[in-house]
Amino acid sequence: MDKHKAFKTALHEKDGIDQPESVSRTAIEHVTQLRKKQPSADELVARILKGDKTALSRAITLVESTNPAHLEKANDVIAQCLPHADKSVRIGITGVPGVGKSTFIEAFGKHLTSLGRKVAVLAVDPSSSLSHGSILGDKTRMEELVKDANAYIRPSASGETLGGVARKTREAIILCEACGFDTIVIETVGVGQSETAVHSMVDFFLLLQIAGAGDELQGIKRGIMEMADLIVINKADGDNIKSARLAKTEFNRALHLFPAKSSGWQPTVTTCSAISHEGIAEVWQTINKYFELVKGNEFFGLRRSEQNSYWLTETINEQLLGRFYHDPAIAGLLEQSKKAVQDNAVSPFAAAKVLLEKYFRL
Amino acid sequence: MDKHKAFKTALHEKDGIDQPESVSRTAIEHVTQLRKKQPSADELVARILKGDKTALSRAITLVESTNPAHLEKANDVIAQCLPHADKSVRIGITGVPGVGKSTFIEAFGKHLTSLGRKVAVLAVDPSSSLSHGSILGDKTRMEELVKDANAYIRPSASGETLGGVARKTREAIILCEACGFDTIVIETVGVGQSETAVHSMVDFFLLLQIAGAGDELQGIKRGIMEMADLIVINKADGDNIKSARLAKTEFNRALHLFPAKSSGWQPTVTTCSAISHEGIAEVWQTINKYFELVKGNEFFGLRRSEQNSYWLTETINEQLLGRFYHDPAIAGLLEQSKKAVQDNAVSPFAAAKVLLEKYFRL
């Protein structure tokens, strides 16, 4: 048949080519591999206990997940890791933006790993879901530490509530400890509520400050100073040395106004220059003295056990309230009730009674 | 028969006297009268609206009762009084024991009634159930005011929780206002948490102080000073006048360190001698200036409506948590869980999950 002719009739149909398979063998292979790679809870735990940081990261991601299936698995991993946890020192570090927290933690962390310690740095920053991780979000700010085989850095979990972020961080502590990290550093921002949360999950609380013009006590809430076991005045270098020493005296005086701590520890003030690594070793010496004291007088164990109780209650309270306020049947009614009490049409107590009766009948 | 002989045999029985009735007719009469006298909710409201202090006291007793039948009636009374409330000024007064709160309130109250105002004095003192009413418990401490026809004094409700005491006081405010009292004074002790509760139910917060040796700012929590709209330094008489003036300067300086209030009001400091009635009129003038400001800039209504929302949420939260912790099926389990988390046998979050699942399945 003449080739050209054949093409000229509209009825002609090309033979076509073989259709490719509707599924890609290689893609199937790839997904199967991936699925195989998702380790079971047991596998994750086994790897964590061997010090595998990739497994640790995966487990923390599970803990942070909002997927209910992940929750189940996360709880399993935590439960298996728990007997291997509780063997570290936990240090909280706070300070308002600008005091040089990242630089300090990098210098402090490197000092610890040089002493043979394994350091995990976590963060509690409830604002991070909005600010896209204002602390530890940019790991490059700790260039040296992030490359250190004996260090592990994890940015803050994101979450709507401080309670949620705090819970996730507290579970991450357990995982890090099971993974062999013997020094857990929890970083937070100096804004108040998150300090209280961090204070209730650490053994030692360090407040980072800088010497500033004017009143040294401004800019940091009194309650946060009251929690501090050590105040470190950073950036005590160059022209700052004199003002840092003055600040040290001022803070020391302020610390003595607070009631004695039940740990028996008298909080102190020290200066350092994180950027030139000066004073970092002294900070660690002070922290060691603290641990000698509280492990000697049994405050250490007592406080950890109190913290466990605290988190039990906090978690229960958060969930009891969250369940009510997120109940779809309640939400609409609550808005109406709020309007009614604001307009003084009904007393807040009567309105609460109606809402609660409705809730418990559901 | 010979009298003596008859008595000598053991078989003798005396004739005896008529048994009295097993019930007392007069007692029945009395109880019937009493029951008749227990007025209905409608009667109580009608009498309260006429300014009847006896009915007011009865209604407050109903509000304070833990009897569920009373609760129903109390809610009815409150609901009917509510449209007649919200027409007073509400003033919170706090100060540590020894600053002369009773003397001040007596002088202040008498000054107000002399101006034609009707003054109700309530108290919030969660400790009163233990201390048998440490504030306002002894009405004789306000001898003059208690006899004043235009004054009404009511000691603190007793209750285990601050939340309970606060709720009862807040409902008592509604009743007092419906009863025609245009000035409500809420007294509390300078211990922290109860100030926050009182602050959230008043329009104006007055902190009573005295000039003392040493640091003037000691002895009162910073957070309480931050709430104050006016600091009054009492006992500025005799040898104290000079130190009171010094204290005034110190407190004034301290007040200026706090951030500006959303009311637009700049808190001030004044001195007075409650015992000699000096400076009392000035205190009332200052309070009046405050009300002129906040009624002009609409802060007054806005704040009351926010307070109503606050109490709605507080009540809901208190009851949601209370119901869980008082659940007999939970209480025992909770103790076990606490022990387990303290011993690090289970994570606080896992333990909370188990308890909550159990609770919501009940």
Image (spheres, coloured by chain):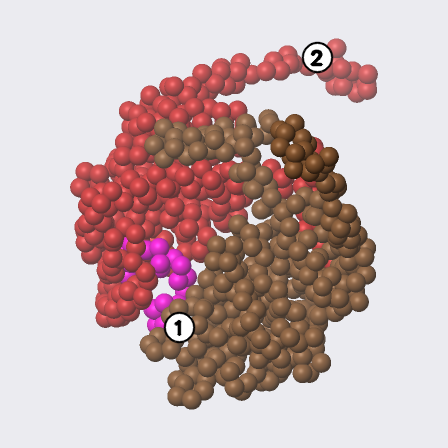
Chain colours: A brown, B red
**Above or below, comparing residue B99 to residue A320 in the picture:** below
Q: Residue at x 66, y 73 (%)?
A: A151
Q: Residue at x 35, y 75 (%)?
A: A215
Q: Helix or strand or loop: what does disc 2 sit on?
A: loop
> In the picture provided, is B229 more to the left or to the right than B312?
left
Q: Quadrant of the N terminus of chain B?
A: top right
Q: Is residue B223 magenta?
A: yes
In the picture of the structure, the residue carrying the numbered disc 1 is A217
Q: Amino acid at mark 1?
A: Leu
> In the picture provided, is B282 more to the left or to the right than A113?
left
Question: What residue span does the magenta drawing correspond to?
Answer: B210-234
Chain of the residue displaying label 1: A
The label number, if any, that marks residue A346 in the structure image:
none
The label number, if any, that marks residue B15 in the structure image:
2
Q: Residue at x 64, y 50 (%)?
A: A65
> In the picture provided, is B150 more to the left or to the right than A115?
left
Q: Residue at x 71, y 80 (%)?
A: A116
